[in-house]
Amino acid sequence: SRPGMQSPTNCVLLSMAVCDLITILIPTPWYIYLYTLGHHEDAEWSTVSCFLYDLLSVTVPQIFHTASNWLTLALAVQRYIYVCHAAVAKQWCTLARSRMFVFVVLGFAVTYMLPRVFDRTYDVIHEAGPSSSVGSEREICLVHFSSWVMKIVNIYFISFWWFRVVFVQIFPCISLVILNILLFSAMRRAEQRRRRLTINKTNNNFKKGGSRPTRSNTIARRMSIFGFSKESRDRRQRDANNTTMMLIVVIAVFLAVELPLSCITALHTISSSVVEFLDYRLVGNIILFINVIICLSYPLNFAIYCGMSRQFRTTFRSLFLNPVKVALCTSSGPGESGDQEGTDVMTSNKNKWLDNTSSTKMSKVMPATTNSTDNNGLLTTNL
């Protein structure tokens, strides 16, 4: 919502964060009710509730997790274009194109998972409970595959899982590893080139000694008038490098939690389509552990943003911390705030008086017959 934060990179980051949040939030009420509160034994089921449970705890999280994987790859490609092909970045990496690409990715993810919504039907059966007392029956959802699935059952599941292995897991992970290496190498080369230029410039200035100001110094002074000073350029370059390094760390965390899941998915697909060799009780426990690690990695991304992005820290401080400080200062009492306000007024008046005095002194120092050659120095001094 802040104009300063609206950029193609932040658009993709926001979309990733929303997808990750939905992946966690949508199935959470079901898990809390059934497992945390212990109602998985005595829950009352119907065909509609069975359908909603499967939809909201399996299908919808997979949709947004798939979209998050593809958006992470898009983020790496976008940053690679920024760093290694800056000439075409303004044409391809725009805010409008980023928004359009986010919607396209979400559309592809929904289209990929849409058959899973209609490939099964549900029945509710009654089964004897763990106790042998009368009336201890429990309701269980029984899943039946649809008639159209049974006709192509092998082709359907093999194509579904192999597509997931190749285009949702393996291909994005391999591409992210390659792009991470390229980004880090490009940053190393840029840093080495900057150091060489700095050393050469220092040596040239040392050789020239106390010679008269050159034309480049005059241009630098003129550029500093409009905010293009060397300090501002260096600050922008540092911010760009920090953003690139932050995205490299985010992608590395993504790879650390996604590569084990990709391996398990690939082994499951091979075991189901070629020859069965997996112990699925063990596989189920491993997948539960991996899912917990993936969920824990989502808040870690927020810590990475705060730790490595000055712009993110500034915006977060202005949105959340500054209102808290204002509220605490207001609640401290009107007398203290009045004293503080009076102190601020006195300080501002003193600063204005010092500025007027210094500008008057500088104008007296300058000769009255200055021509256009001295205007740049006078203007820079007054600013």
Image (cartoon, rainbow, N blue to C red):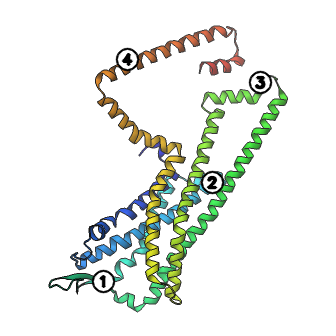
Looking at numbered disc 4 in the image, what kind of residue is underneath it? Answer: Gly
Measure how far apart labels 4 and 1 are at the Cα level: 73 Å
Per the image, the residue denoted by label 1 is 121
Q: Is residue 318 left or right of residue 167?
A: left
- Give the number of the mark in front: 1 or 2: 1
Q: Is residue 168 visible?
A: no
Q: Comparing marks 4 and 3, which lies closer to the viewer?
A: 4
User: Residue furthest toward the bottom?
Assistant: 151
Q: Spatial distance from mark 4 to mark 2, Cα to Cα?
A: 53 Å
- Classify residue 323 as left or right of residue 383: left
Left or right of 62, for residue 231: right
Q: List the residue tagged with mark 3.
A: 213
Q: Earlier in the sequence, mark 2 or mark 3?
A: 2
**Spot occupied by residue 293 in the image (x, y as percentages of width and height):** 46, 65
Q: Which element carries disc 2, helix, strand or loop?
A: helix
249 and 234: which is toward the camera? 249
- Which residue is labeled 4 in the image? 342
Determine whether 231 is above or below 181 in the image: above
